[in-house]
């Protein structure tokens, strides 16, 4: 599944926010290559710049040093070639699920309807087309948000702690769902999380970021067959590896 | 098995709870009147009020007064809504427009309804135009303010959503900005309806020879306190009908809100 040609290149990227209180460096000199079809988990202490990195790739935060290049094009503003999943689903409460999923799509109505049907099925929401977001559970709403993004065929899907607001059981279930969608759709995915198990369960590689201003501290490839067994010994070894890397990275800091 | 009996008992209890105080007061009022403790000309008995209401219904004057006032309200409300929505939407979406329009609206708002009337009568006489203008003024103020507020309060998160989905300006306004402003706009419409009713009565009292406001004034002149109170009740009923019509439309169009509960 993984194509070895680098397709999203993050090269020496730094970002500093300035406001009336002065300058706050968020990211320092981050370099990372993401391969086509890959699932990259990014994990780091809370408050570090990992979300900023994702927002830079999405084009939501602008002006940075270094280069972020997607298929040869430097990223400077938002675009449909990158999908973004926020921590909250951000479905519009006044639109039905199918209207939400097709938001902003143009062209032949029948064609759009057909597409919506395909993607509703992909995220396991068939039959919920006419429901309103308030009638869905948190996990279902987040899946609808994923469908809304995937239907536009992004080259890379950026997930910013997408399961952070869900309860533990729903979360575990959704991790399986995301893996299933990733396998079925083949879209490259980059997910920021602060859940170590989630990072290992989903990632082909786990990127460990340091405390702010954040740098790439360590990259751990996860060489486990999918779907991964959270209870297995190998999984536990990876968990220890990540925790150790974390402890080294943050030193005296607490996660 | 006796569920229906329980249901009826519950309904009766509910009606009793709601109606006990008003009905009790009415009874007390009727008794005090019939005992001669309350002067009929100051506070006529409920039965006299009913009789007066019956009379103005039968002789057709009530119908004419209601229709006259309603027509004025409709015209004033319509133009007020058009102006308020257009100016409110423009001000909510554009800071430059807001800086021009808001101060004007704010000054108009601070000058009470009654204070406008002498000038308007001086300019336009006591004809229909002045009355419609006064009603429209009452409509524009709350609706403008609520429209601006509703549009400004669009969740910032949706702006980011619009960016990542590359929504066109038109789609953004149509699918995000206006739907999210609708609850606030409906609040404005309901406040505006109350203002319109108030304005029409005021306008008709200060100038003119027709409508509910004039009828009230006339009843006072002739000391027809029974008719006066009957007319006041009619105005209350009209107000309640307006409010429930708008509330009904709101519930229909904002169906998504209901599903939250």
Image: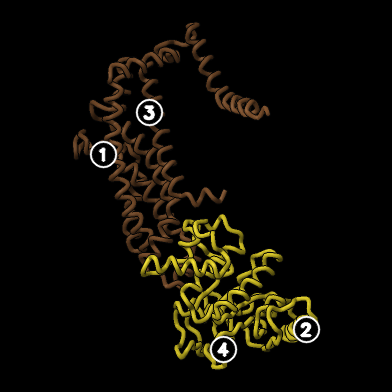
Chain colours: A yellow, B brown
Figure disc tally: 4
> Which comes before the other along the chain, label 4 or label 2?
4
Residue B129: which quarter of the image? top left
Callouts 2 and 3 close, C-beta under 8 Å? no
Question: Residue at position x 29%, y 44% from top?
Answer: B78
Image position of A165 with respect to A152: above or below: above
Q: Nearer the viewer, mark 4 or mark 1?
A: 4
Provide the secondary structure element on which disc 3 rests.
helix
Q: Nearer the viewer, mark 2 or mark 1?
A: 2
Provide the secondary structure element on which disc 2 rests.
helix
Q: Nearer the viewer, mark 2 or mark 3?
A: 2
Cα–Cα gap, marks 1 and 3: 18 Å
Q: Nearer the viewer, mark 1 or mark 3?
A: 3
Question: Residue at position x 31%, y 54% from top?
Answer: B86
Q: Which mark is residue B132?
A: 1
Most extreme residue toward the top is: B35
Q: Are marks 1 and 3 on the same chain?
A: yes
Cα–Cα gap, marks 4 and 1: 69 Å
The residue where tag 2 is placed is: A234
Cα–Cα gap, marks 2 and 3: 79 Å
Q: Which mark is residue B235?
A: 3
Q: Is residue A169 left or right of residue B99?
A: right
Residue A140 lies, in percent from the top left, at: 59, 63
**Protein chain holding label 1:** B
Question: Residue at position x 68%, y 81% from top?
Answer: A226
**Protein chain holding label 3:** B
Q: Is residue A23 visible?
A: no
Q: Are marks 4 and 1 on the same chain?
A: no
């Amino acid at each position: 599944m993984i194509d070895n040609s680098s397709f999203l290149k993050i090269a020496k990227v730094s970002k500093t926010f300035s406001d009336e209180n002065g300058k706050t460096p968020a990211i320092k000199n981050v370099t990372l290559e993401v391969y086509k079809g890959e699932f990259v988990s990014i994990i780091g202490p809370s408050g570090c710049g990992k979300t900023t990195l994702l927002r830079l790739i999405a084009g939501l935060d602008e002006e940075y040093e270094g280069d972020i290049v997607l298929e040869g094009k430097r990223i400077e503003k938002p675009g449909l070639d990158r999908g973004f999943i926020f921590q909250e689903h951000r479905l519009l409460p006044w639109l039905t699920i199918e209207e939400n999923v097709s938001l902003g799509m143009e062209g032949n109505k029948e064609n759009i309807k057909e597409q919506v049907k395909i993607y509703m099925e992909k995220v396991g929401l068939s039959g919920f087309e006419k429901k309103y977001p308030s009638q869905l559970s948190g996990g279902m709403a987040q899946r609808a948000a994923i469908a809304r993004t995937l239907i536009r065929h992004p080259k890379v899907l950026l997930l910013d702690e997408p399961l952070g607001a869900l309860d533990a059981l729903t979360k575990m279930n959704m991790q399986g769902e995301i893996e299933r969608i990733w396998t079925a759709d083949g879209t490259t995915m980059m997910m920021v999380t602060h859940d170590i198990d989630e990072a290992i369960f989903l990632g082909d590689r786990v990127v460990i970021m340091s405390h702010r201003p954040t740098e790439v501290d360590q990259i751990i490839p996860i060489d486990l067959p999918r779907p991964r067994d959270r209870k297995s010994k190998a999984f536990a070894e990876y968990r220890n590896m990540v925790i150790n890397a974390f402890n080294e990275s943050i030193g005296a800091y607490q996660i | 098995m006796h569920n229906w009996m329980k249901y009826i008992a519950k309904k009766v209890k509910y009606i009793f709870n709601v109606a006990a105080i008003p009905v009790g007061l009415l009874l007390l009022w009727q008794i005090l009147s019939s005992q001669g403790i309350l002067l009929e000309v100051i506070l006529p008995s409920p039965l006299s009020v009913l009789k007066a209401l019956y009379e103005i219904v039968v002789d057709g004057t009530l119908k004419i007064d209601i229709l006259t006032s309603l027509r004025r309200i409709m015209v004033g409300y319509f133009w007020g809504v058009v102006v308020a929505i257009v100016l409110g939407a423009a001000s909510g979406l554009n800071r430059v427009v807001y800086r021009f329009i808001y101060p004007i609206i704010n000054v108009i708002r601070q000058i009470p309804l009654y204070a406008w009337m002498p000038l308007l009568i001086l300019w336009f006489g006591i004809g229909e135009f002045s009355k419609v203008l006064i009603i429209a003024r009452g409509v524009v103020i709350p609706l403008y303010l609520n429209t601006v507020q509703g549009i400004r309060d669009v969740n910032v998160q949706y702006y980011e959503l619009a960016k990542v989905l590359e929504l066109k300006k038109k789609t953004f306004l149509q699918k995000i900005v206006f739907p999210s402003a609708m609850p606030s706009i409906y609040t404005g419409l309901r406040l505006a309806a109350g203002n319109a009713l108030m304005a029409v009565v005021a306008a008709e009292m200060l100038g003119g020879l027709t409508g509910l406001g004039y009828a009230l004034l006339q009843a006072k002149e002739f000391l027809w306190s029974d008719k006066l109170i009957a007319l006041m009740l009619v105005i209350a009923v009209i107000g309640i009908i307006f409010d429930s019509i708008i509330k009904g439309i709101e519930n229909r169009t904002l169906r998504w809100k209901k599903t939250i509960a």
